[in-house]
Structure formats: C-alpha cells, structure tokens
Image (tube, rainbow, N blue to C red):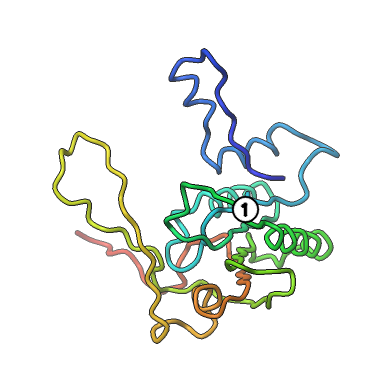
C-alpha cells in the first residue's frame, strides 16, 4: 500500500478541495477502512519521500506519520526517503529512483516473509544521494541530534503567511557512531532504523500529588 493524496476535481469549492487533500496519515488510514478480506493491505509503504527523514526531527515527517498510522491498523510499515538537497525539495528535477525502488522491494519482501518484532512499528529507510542497489546497508538508531534547523523569519507582518527557511546541520564529532545521520550524511550508506510505536518514556517520574 502506498500513501496517495486525493486531488480535487475542477469546479469544486474551496471546502471540498480541502476535504479532498487529506494528510498523509489520513490517506494511510483510508485503505484499511475502505477494504476488507483479500483486499486488505499486508504491508504499507509511505511514498519515497523527497528529502531524508533522519535525526531528532522525525515528528515533522508526513511519511513517518503515515507509516505509524498504518501500524495502528495492524499493518507493518516502511517509510522510505531519498536524500535530496533542500534547494531541490520544490523543484523535483530529474532523479534516479532505481535504488529507492530496489530497497523498498527488498525490505518489503523481508517484512512480508518474517513480519516485524512486536515492539517495532515502522522501518525507516533513508537512501543516500547517488546510491545504487550495491550501496552498503547499515542498521542504525535515530540520532538525538537535530538535522533540520529552521531559521528565524525576521520582521514581517504577522497577518501574512511565511515559509520558514531551513538548513541541515551535521556535526560529526557530536553524532552517535551508529546514528542515522552519520550513516546517510557522513558515510553515504543506506540507513535502516526500526522505530517503535510508543512515545512513552521509560522513567520512574511521577506527577506531583499536590499543588
């Protein structure tokens, strides 16, 4: 299964167009709700994202969110992203997607054959720019370092829309040796990170019992 946006038809009003442009998570929820039996998806693959999803910023990713939503329906997920310079995010020029397709198929087959361990919700795959099917694959962990840093927008009329500028930050000396950022941004290998479903912290912390 692959997340898809539903496009508005000519002549639809603005409210109808908004209803027909769901979030990635909503599109991933649509398939299991709309199909049953033999048509039910056995695995979910978020679209090959144009830009890598690595580091502490994963919660901004629609691709990751869609795959996690699929897991809520009992469908194991792949979130596949291809490294792309920020300047290319909105230009969508010529790009070879062969490696991304290869690794998507490869890990989809593994999940269909073996399933996923109980604590794993999504396999987050990030394919470096210029990768081929022979590029090294590394099992990684999500880095605690930020990868995308948004820049202050400066003085502006607050009633006007603004698009925040973003840049990537890679500090090799601060990166975990097995991190996703190091794998993709420093070493140019395919990063494969198992992600869990739960954001609950493992801690003995308790809320205060009085004011």
**158 vs 128: above or below:** above
Q: In x, y percent, where is residue 51?
A: 51, 58
The image shows residue 131, relative to residue 31, as above or below, that is below
Image: 48 above or below 41? below
Which residue: 56% across, 38% down? 26
Q: Residue at x 19, y 34 (%)?
A: 159
Residue in view at x 47 percent, y 63 percent? 200
Q: Is 84 on the left or on the right of 155, as rendered?
A: right
Q: Position of residue 206 (x, y in %)?
A: 35, 68
Q: Quadrant of the C terminus?
A: bottom left
The residue labelled by disc 1 is 48
Q: Quadrant of the N terminus?
A: top right
Q: Horizontally, is 27 left or right of 149 in the view? A: right
Q: Nearer the viewer, residue 208 or 5?
A: 5
- For the residue pair 35 and 205, the one nearer the viewer reads as 35
Q: Position of residue 164 (x, y in %)?
A: 30, 50
Which quadrant of the view contains residue 37? top right
């Amino acid at each position: 299964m692959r997340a898809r946006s539903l496009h508005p038809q000519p002549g639809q009003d603005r409210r109808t167009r908004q209803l027909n442009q769901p979030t990635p998570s909503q599109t991933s929820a649509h398939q299991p709700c709309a199909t049953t039996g033999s048509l039910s998806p056995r695995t979910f693959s978020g679209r090959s994202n144009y830009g890598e999803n690595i580091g502490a910023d994963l919660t901004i990713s629609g691709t990751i969110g869609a795959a996690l939503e699929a897991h809520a329906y009992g469908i194991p997920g792949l979130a596949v992203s291809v490294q792309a310079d920020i300047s290319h995010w909105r230009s969508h020029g010529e790009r070879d997607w062969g490696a991304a397709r290869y690794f998507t198929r490869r890990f989809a087959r593994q999940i269909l054959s073996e399933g996923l361990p109980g604590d794993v919700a999504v396999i987050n795959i990030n394919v470096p720019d210029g990768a081929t099917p022979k590029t090294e694959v590394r099992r990684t962990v999500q880095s605690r370092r930020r990868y995308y840093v948004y820049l202050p927008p400066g003085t502006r009329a607050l009633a006007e829309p603004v698009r925040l500028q973003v840049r990537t930050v890679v500090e090799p000396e601060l990166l975990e040796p097995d991190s996703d950022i190091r794998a993709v941004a420093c070493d140019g290998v395919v990063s494969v990170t198992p992600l869990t479903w739960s954001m609950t912290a493992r801690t003995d912390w308790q809320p205060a019992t009085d004011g």
